[in-house]
Image (cartoon, rainbow, N blue to C red):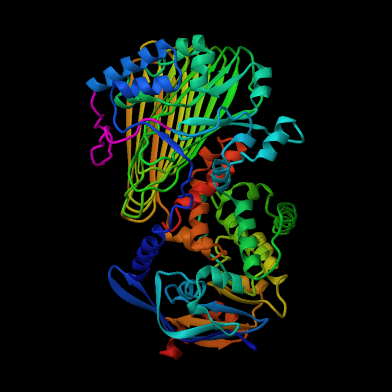
Amino acid sequence: MPAVSETREAVEKLAKSNYEWGFETNVEMDLAPKGLNEDIVRLISARKKEPQWMLEWRLKAFRAWQEMSEPNWAKIKHPPIDYQDAHYFAQPKKKPGPKSLDEVDPELLKTYEKLGIPLHEQEMLAGVEGAGQKTPVAVDAVFDSVSVATTFRKTLAEAGVIFCPISEAIIEHPELVKKYLGTVVPVADNFFSALNSAVFTDGSFVYVPKGVRCPMELSTYFRINARNTGQFERTLIIAEDQATVSYLEGCTAPQRDENQLHAAVVELVAMEDAFIKYSTVQNWYPGDENGKGGIYNFVTKRGICKGDRARISWTQVETGSAITWKYPSCILAGKGSVGEFYSVAVTNGHQQADTGTKMIHLAPDTRSTIVAKTISAGKSDSTYRGLVRMQPKARNGRNFTQCDSLLIGNQCGAHTVPYIESRNMSARVEHEATTSKISEDQLFYCRSRGFSEEEAVGLIVNGFCREVLKELPMEFAVEAQKLLQISLEGSVG
Amino acid sequence: MSDFLKIEGLKAQIDADGTPKEILKGLDLTIPKGEVHAIMGPNGSGKSTLSYVLAGREDYEVTGGSAHFKGQDLLELEPEERAALGVFLAFQSPVELPGVNNANFLRTAVNAVRKARGEEELDAVSFLKLAREETARLSMSGEMLKRAVNVGFSGGEKKRNEVLQMRLLKPSLAILDETDSGLDIDALRIVADGVNSLRGPDFSSLVITHHQRLLDYIVPDRVHVMAHGRIIHSGGPEVATLLEKQGYKQFLEAAA
């Protein structure tokens, strides 16, 4: 049928459209030699001027990692990763301690500008002085492993909120870091978390004291820039009793040839009546038209609702990476605590995503909600993998799971793999799943109203994801909608 | 240019389980500017196919003939280009778009078309004002603007939503494919009023229907009888009355 072959041509043509944000920043780099051994771990720790306890923590992790092997249960395929063929430390050479954006390498700022990151000096300074700024956003910018600029620190400090690079927290707030680091994701939790624990170079640290509602959205932008540098972010967020915080994480990366490993660890701790909202928009380089050169993203994200009625909400829009392996999870340990997971995962080209969540109900009256939207196009493959576990004490535990898959074209795959374990008779677990295709009817209907084919796909996909997108903070939601459209350009089927 | 829409010897086929099936078999039809024409015909005569081919649906392969609108070769244009040119198809079965807000859909559509026509785009406020006026005119609840496009709409609501879209997009050629089906008499009147008030020197319409009933309210300038993929008879509004009384038989026999 002519319509089908034309569609296929259109897909192939447009799938070749270049990664819009693939460019490289030319900044002098300070690189550690390739490879991973105890000396490298020591070097990282020394470069970070870390105390002895931190070095020992890292070495313990490294030794654990050496005993472990890569997990192989995910529905992903990739050539073996040579962990010795990467740099584990890269740092832009900089003048000692930039105190303001003026001192930041203009090349970096230019890169951010290209990305449309609102780290514009004027805007930020205006925000600091509170000159008509609506919703201030504090940005802790991570540029290749090192936090380059942190804004809004003062305002946050006045509220008692600590928001700083984790390397700084290790030195400035060792008691907090020692108390919580590795408590949610133990060092040897999995292969990638152990690796991260050994070699992480930076990330963010957030501490919101009792009763404090964080006065602004916190955001961090990660980019991967140096050739062959693994990126190992480590994030730790602690919300004390009745504290509230919303954290945004957005990622884009420049185009490159070789696969890049990314293994971040994020830990969230929510005490009594605390609320942590963690939102991610991820758009890392997915690889070229043949699937070469994209980011391998192996992430461990987990939060614990330690106190009663605590709430943790994960929202993610994942459009990038060659491989995504990611299961933001909640451990519901406090009575009546709440875990939420809202996810949109888009795969196109040759991307592979195995993503989902785990909701571990430990205490009575705990509730969890999972809404996962999967969109597959091109030759991509996407799997939702979710675990809901009701432990014996999870009396009246409730879970609702909804997984919807949307297929575009006929060469992609979508899979749903729910794991449900209930050990309490009074617990209730619901799972709904649907799979659908964007129909020719829908496309034609939109086009007959004046939409181009791509606008029509964007519209339909955004409609499909609406339940998740509305969970994102406003400024992020707009960005995410654009991203969905960009990611699916030319994937009409 | 009195021949606004000119269709000559149009042939189109669809793929039916691997074998092409010809549905339009050399259809001729001309609609001058400012006129409203009706097409009536038995089931399977190709009425809906004609509407889809004119709007640009890709499942149909045009194998012969031509269709020009405002002097342009319609068949060369993408569906969205036809929309910009002023072609509007009110669907027989409007499509559901889950999660897509109706107001947002309408505004984006209106602005896409306005932009393509070189007109100024409407901002959210002026659009909403316009949309509210139009929904009131069609006795639609304002709630319908907030819902997802056609999702959970009753048959009648879907048809009104089509007419709402038509009024907002301001086409110069509106093709109504059995817009009357599923409407009660009050709704029919409202929908007919929605069409009639657009009538004027720059508005032409092709009304496809099974029943004379609609044509009591939208009185056509010409009525065409369609059978076996062709127009087999054309006449004034009286043809509709005749059909209602005597059925298609005499026309089919005369054409045979």
Residue B215 can be seen in this image? yes
The structure residue drawn at horizontal position 73% and vertical position 35%, both measured from the top left corner, is: A126
> Does the magenta stretch mainly form a helix, a strand or a loop?
loop
Count of picture labels: 0
Residue B108 in percent (x, y) is at: 61, 57
Q: Quadrant of residue A362?
A: top left
The magenta span reads A68-90
Question: Who is closer to the viewer here, A198 or B63?
Answer: A198
Q: Is residue A257 above or below residue B162?
A: above
Query: Is A152 covered by the magenta stretch?
Result: no
Q: Is residue A194 above or below residue B202?
A: above
Please identify the residue farthest to the right as the structure is shown: A131
Q: Is residue A333 above or below residue A27?
A: above
Question: Who is closer to the viewer here, B126 or A102?
Answer: A102
Residue B155 in percent (x, y) is at: 55, 56
Query: Which quarter of the figure is the N terminus of chain A placed in?
Result: bottom left
Question: Who is closer to the viewer here, A428 or A318?
Answer: A318
Residue B177 can be seen in this image? no
Query: Which quarter of the figure is the C terminus of chain A placed in?
Result: bottom left
Question: Who is closer to the viewer here, A219 or A450?
Answer: A219
Residue B217 in percent (x, y) is at: 67, 71
Q: Quadrant of residue B120?
A: bottom right
Residue A262 in percent (x, y) is at: 37, 34
Please identify the residue farthest to the front as the structure is shown: A95
